[in-house]
Each structure stands twice: as structure tokens, then as C-alpha cells.
Image: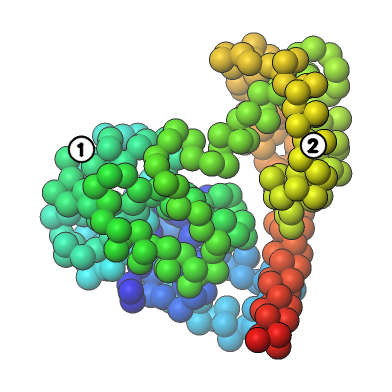
């Protein structure tokens, strides 16, 4: 693996391009509009500057990372002689299929084609593919340059060597990966997230608490613990007899609705889309710029803490051998 192509320069695309470039790969990032590429370059530059300020990156490394990225609006240029393609274009199936048609007419049979989608299964993505065995899903989380996990999804036609190469590649760019044993809608994280959101929405509808109350409660409990101790490990530490009793006592009262809550539909219909409209569950003045900056600053602090913790574990393991 030497050359990486990222298709799409949006929130996910520019962050993934940054990841690969930081790891020393030559990266081409492609978008249809020059303005999208300029914004992507500005965001990557700002992200790297913050990492330099936090001493997580040297200025030389920042310059090298920027030099590793080539920006283009030409799809054919972007995919020439590439080894790995990450597709992060809008979630429109026909657009993706048309893009794959072009890709497969240009690249070699050994080029791996990965999608960042969590919407479409590989069976749909590969319905017109000449070589479906080289398709895979690498699902990153926003912001991808900071959130450590990647979900890897395959299907029955995916070549196992493609899975291994992709897994190793994610490790090289600093990601922890989970490989799903079978494809399922929403994968792992979004399924758990939607289950939690369903109950959070239910509590709001029932007048139990406000959106702010839920955020405060979760950030100060599960949000505090889960960065270092996942939900199932937490139950081991608490004692599974306690977990059994808790589940037995509460699960019958949990929401099992299959509908999007009415209040959420109404918010969307009113144009309350969150930071993009300066109003969602909260109000914003700057399309969330300050909130995003604070979030990313905190994420970088946490990422640095996690990296330091992992380094200490490796040191300890090495000295005890």
C-alpha cells in the first residue's frame, strides 16, 4: 500500500485523508467542486495546527502531512495507480454505483474499494461490480481523525485477504478496528446508539427530564466510564448478578416503539436541524463553530490520554516478558 484515494471532501472525507497522510501515505482527495477542496484543506490545516499546539505533532510532521495530500476535482486523476480507495460521497445509491463503474474501468484488480457508508449493505453496493470480492466497508466516526474506532463490514463475497489488508491498514493509521462477523443494518455502534436514543427520546416525551438533563447525566456517568471501560466490561466490574437484577427490573418498562418520536419529526419540519440551522435541542450563534472547537479540543485531550495509557501498557508488557 502506497497510494490512497479519498472520494469526497466533506466532514468524513477530509478527516480520513488527514489520517492517511499523517501515517505517511500519498493521498489524493477528490471532490466535484474546488470550494469543497479548499474547505477541506483549511479544515485539515486547522486540525493539524491544534495537534502541534498540543505537542501531539511536530511542525515538520505537519508540513510533511500537508505535502502528502493532493487535491483534485478530476475523478480519473484521483484513482489512477491507487492501491486503496475510500468512498465517502453522499448516501445516494445510484451515485455510488455510477462512481464504482468508473472506478472499476480504471483501477487494477488488486485495488481495494472501501465505503464509509452505514446505510447500504455490500450486497447493494456491489450489484453492478465486476469484482465484488474487493469491496469492503470501513465505517469511521465523526470526527474521523480523532475518534479511534473503525467498524469493518464484509459480506459473503469479500475476499478474506481484503479483510486482512484493510484491518492492517487501519492499524497503521492508528485505528482500533472491529470486524463484524456478519453484516447487519447499522453495524455495532449505531445500533447501540439508536437503542439508547430511543429511550432518551421516550424519557423526554414522558416529561421525566429535559434533553439537557439527559446529556448531563450521561456525560457524568457512562460517558465518563466508557472511554476506558466499555459497557460489558463495566458490568463485569459491577457484578453480573447486579446486572441481571437491573435488567429484570427495568427492561419491561423500556420503550419498544418502532416510530420516530413526533417531537423529533416536528423539529426537523421546523428546520431545527442542529448546528446547521443554529437550533436543535440547543441554540447556537455560529453554526456550532465554538461547540465543535471545544469538542475537538476535549477529544484531543482524551486521545492523548488514551495513547499515553496504551504506551504505558506496552512498556509494562515488555518489561514483564
For residue 147, the mark is none
Crowd tier of the residue under label 2, counting other residues whose Cα lies within 10 Å: few below 14, some 14–19, many 20 or above: few
- Visible residue check, residue 38: no
Identify the residue at the far front of this view.
241
Task: Name which quarter of the figure residue 262 lies in.
Answer: top right
Split into 4 quadrants, where in the image is the C terminus?
A: bottom right
Kindly identify the residue that appears in the image at 27 percent across and 44 percent down: 156
* Of residues 105 and 48, the one drawn nearer to the viewer in this rendering: 105
Task: Name which quarter of the figure residue 302 lies in.
Answer: bottom right
Number of marks in the rendered image? 2
Kindly identify the residue that appears in the image at 56 percent across and 37 percent down: 190
**Residue depth check, mark 2 versus mark 1: number of the one nearer the observer:** 2
| Residue named by callout 2 | 241
- Residue 132 placement, left or right of 137: left
Crowd tier of the residue under label 1, counting other residues whose Cα lies within 10 Å: few below 14, some 14–19, many 20 or above: few
| Residue 307 position within the rendered picture, expressed as x and y whole percent measured from the top left | 69, 71
Circle 2 — which element?
helix
- Residue 26 placement, left or right of 246: left
| Residue 218 position within the rendered picture, expressed as x and y whole percent measured from the top left | 80, 38
| Residue named by callout 1 | 127
| Residue 122 position within the rendered picture, expressed as x and y whole percent measured from the top left | 31, 41
Amino acid at each position: 500500500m502506497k497510494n490512497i484515494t479519498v472520494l469526497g471532501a466533506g466532514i468524513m472525507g477530509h478527516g480520513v485523508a488527514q489520517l492517511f497522510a499523517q501515517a505517511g501515505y500519498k493521498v489524493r482527495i477528490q471532490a466535484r467542486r474546488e470550494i469543497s477542496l479548499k474547505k477541506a484543506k483549511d479544515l485539515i490545516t486547522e486540525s493539524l495546527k491544534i495537534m502541534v499546539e498540543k505537542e501531539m505533532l511536530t511542525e515538520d510532521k505537519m508540513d510533511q502531512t500537508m505535502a502528502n495530500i493532493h487535491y483534485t476535482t478530476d475523478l480519473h486523476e484521483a484513482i489512477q495507480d491507487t492501491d486503496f480507495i475510500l468512498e465517502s460521497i453522499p448516501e445516494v445509491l445510484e451515485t455510488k454505483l455510477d462512481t464504482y463503474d468508473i472506478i472499476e474501468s480504471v483501477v487494477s484488480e488488486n485495488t481495494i474499494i472501501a465505503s464509509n457508508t452505514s446505510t447500504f449493505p455490500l450486497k447493494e453496493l456491489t450489484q453492478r461490480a465486476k469484482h465484488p470480492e474487493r469491496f469492503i466497508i470501513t465505517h469511521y466516526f465523526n470526527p474521523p481523525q480523532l475518534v479511534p474506532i473503525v467498524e469493518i463490514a464484509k459480506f459473503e463475497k469479500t475476499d478474506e485477504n481484503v479483510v486482512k489488508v484493510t484491518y492492517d491498514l487501519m492499524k497503521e493509521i492508528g485505528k482500533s478496528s472491529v470486524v463484524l462477523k456478519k453484516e447487519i443494518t447499522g453495524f455495532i455502534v449505531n445500533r447501540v446508539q439508536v437503542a439508547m436514543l430511543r429511550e432518551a427520546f421516550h424519557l423526554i416525551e414522558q416529561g421525566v427530564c429535559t434533553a439537557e438533563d439527559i446529556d448531563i447525566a450521561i456525560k457524568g456517568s457512562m460517558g465518563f466510564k466508557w472511554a476506558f471501560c466499555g459497557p460489558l466490561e463495566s458490568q463485569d466490574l459491577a457484578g453480573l448478578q447486579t446486572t441481571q437484577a437491573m435488567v429484570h427490573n427495568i427492561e419491561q418498562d423500556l420503550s419498544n416503539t418502532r416510530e420516530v418520536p413526533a417531537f423529533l419529526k416536528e423539529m426537523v419540519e421546523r428546520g431545527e436541524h442542529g448546528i446547521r440551522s443554529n437550533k436543535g435541542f440547543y441554540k447556537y450563534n455560529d453554526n456550532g463553530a465554538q461547540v465543535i472547537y471545544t469538542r475537538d479540543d476535549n477529544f484531543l485531550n482524551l486521545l492523548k490520554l488514551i495513547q499515553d495509557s496504551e504506551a504505558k501498557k506496552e512498556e509494562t508488557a515488555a518489561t514483564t516478558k
